[in-house]
Image: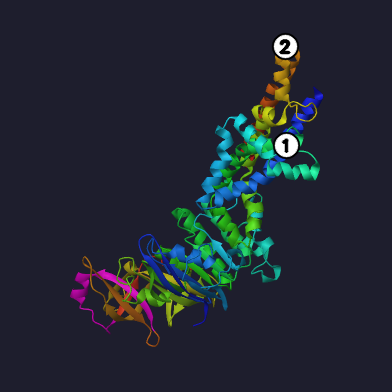
Amino acid sequence: MNFCLTGHIRGRLESFTLDAELNIPAEGVTALFGPSGSGKSTILKSIAGLLKLENSSLRVFEKDWQTDREFLAPHKRPIGYVFQDARLFDHLNVEKNLVFGLKRSNEKDQLLPRDEVYTLLGLTPMLHRSVRTLSGGEKQRVAIGRALLSSPRLLLMDEPLSALDRQAKDEIIPYLERLKRRLRIPILYVSHDMREIERIADHILLLDTGRVVGEGPLIDILSNPDYPFVGSDAAASIISGTIRAYHASDHLTELEVKGQAFLLPGNIGEIGSRHRVRIAASDVSLAKEKPSKTTILNILPVQVHEILPSDEGRVNVTLHLGDTDPVSLVARISSRSLSSFDFKKGQSVYAQIKGVPIIERK
Amino acid sequence: MIETIWLTVKLAGLTTILLLLLGTPLAWWLARSKSWFTEVIGTLVALPLVLPPTVIGFYLLLALGPDSPVGQVTQSLFGTTLPFTFEGLLIASCLYSLPFVVQPVRNAFEAIGDNPLEAAATLRASPVDRFFSIALPLARPGLITGTVLGFAHTVGEFGVVLMIGGNIPGETRVLSIAIYDYVESLQWTEAHILSGGLVAFSFLVIFITMSVEKKRKARA
């Protein structure tokens, strides 16, 4: 894999020692996931040069940002930084905040035209407002726009949604998804909320008490029993597919995943475009034979792949869809169903998906 | 009388300008530096708040007098020493009013914290750029307070002027000295005009500054 950033961040934090080896892919969104206080923000600050940890090293875009002898000043690093608390400049209005970095960067490095950034983030109506009058979600959108306009080659986002309430979060996530599709630069996204990560990340770096304990494509990590996600009560799987049709009379979009049709409510996007769907394990149930009398729309033929140890009467079962290079699904069923139906590894069963899966929209 | 008023305004104005130019970087350093030495300097800057003006005047008289190294330099360069000149008075005023400018500006810088400055650094602003584009505008209320206090405090100084300036018309005879003189020689009318004028002036300056700040805040 091609990395845009490699490095080793070391340092003593309050309760543990940070010793994280970093390899950040040159493409897509890489999530830095870990519990609060696991060193995520410290790593991000070190990458930005806001914090200088001795004995650390960083090499980004083939240039040394930090070695034993060198330390590149933060304002010389081509990054964009979105802080948890927006950190807009109170003495400037929205537009002046937005162009603060733009004025200080090279025009030819521009990622996107200014107007497009304004449109993508819905900023145009608020340009002349004072930043003090903005809501939390609006502030964070301005902060993202401000970072993008400074022509970064790497975007660092430090829990950009964690200070927001549920409503504001839901308001911002679609903007992030749109940005992700439009931007060509790698994004390092720090979060302790798996729900956010499942919606926007491509890769994930798991951090625990200052160490990287796992890394890889998000889809693989989510279904890998070596990591705590697939066995948990919040387990989910992410599958991606291509839109084949929109059935206007039923308001359903047909997404093709491994030759199987997957029906989703609403008009999701253009025919031929790729989208990913998050399916919660608790929305998936299993049947030995294809159920014929049911209101559930999505019933997929799958193979039982692995049965994970149960907790409190529930058990998570990983399933494979497709024979070659299968897609993983997780079902959370009761231990009683498991024993009465006697599901076994390799067995062909039917997965019924109820509820409305969360999908990336354009 | 006009001469006295003009001299006072000139002294207070120049003192304030000098203190803003020198005191602001000093306040920035005091607010940002983490060395143990910072508090030593911080204490020295605050000393004029507690010392009797006569003490400052006394040491300045010695430090600037003909027997001191500074005195010898000024003697050989300009053929005179600083005590009992306008320039000497200006230096004394700067020292005496220093904490009144540095303290509020330092507090304002400290209140800004690291957050906006870090954000500016990630937006390609160099340290000098951050000082001018972020720190100074955000410290505006502190700068205004410092300006008003520095000016007003210099207008009101008495002890230091008496020690180092004396009472030379057009050179060192400022309002406070003139009022003292008028009272001593029982010229009540003149004393009333100057004193009343000072009260009105001080009230207006403080009132206008406060109103302007309040309006600005309400607008933002």
As displayed, is residue A335 above or below residue A259? above
Image quadrant for the C terminus of chain A? bottom right
Which of the labelled discs sits on residue A119, or is there none?
Answer: none
- Residue located 67% across and 46% down the image: B22
The residues tagged by marks 2 and 1 sit, at their Cα atoms, a distance apart of 30 Å
Task: Give the label, 2 or 1, closer to the camera.
Answer: 1
- Residue located 79% across and 29% down the image: B6
Image check: A54 left or right of A75?
Answer: left
The earlier-in-sequence mark between 2 and 1 is: 1
As displayed, is residue B155 above or below residue A278? above
As displayed, is residue B17 above or below residue A23? above
What residue did someone put label 1 on? B88
Which of the labelled discs sits on residue B186, or is there none?
Answer: 2
Evaluate whether residue B215 shows in this view: no
The foreground one among A88 and B73 is B73
- Residue located 56% across and 67% down the image: A179
Which chain does tag 2 point to? B
> Which region is colored magenta?
A326-348
Image check: A56 left or right of B116?
Answer: left
Q: Position of residue B104 (x, y in %)?
A: 59, 40
Q: Position of residue A312 (x, y in %)?
A: 21, 65
Task: Tell whether position A184 is magenta.
Answer: no
Say which element carries label 2: loop
Task: Tell whether position A346 is magenta.
Answer: yes
Q: Quadrant of residue A277 in the image?
A: bottom left
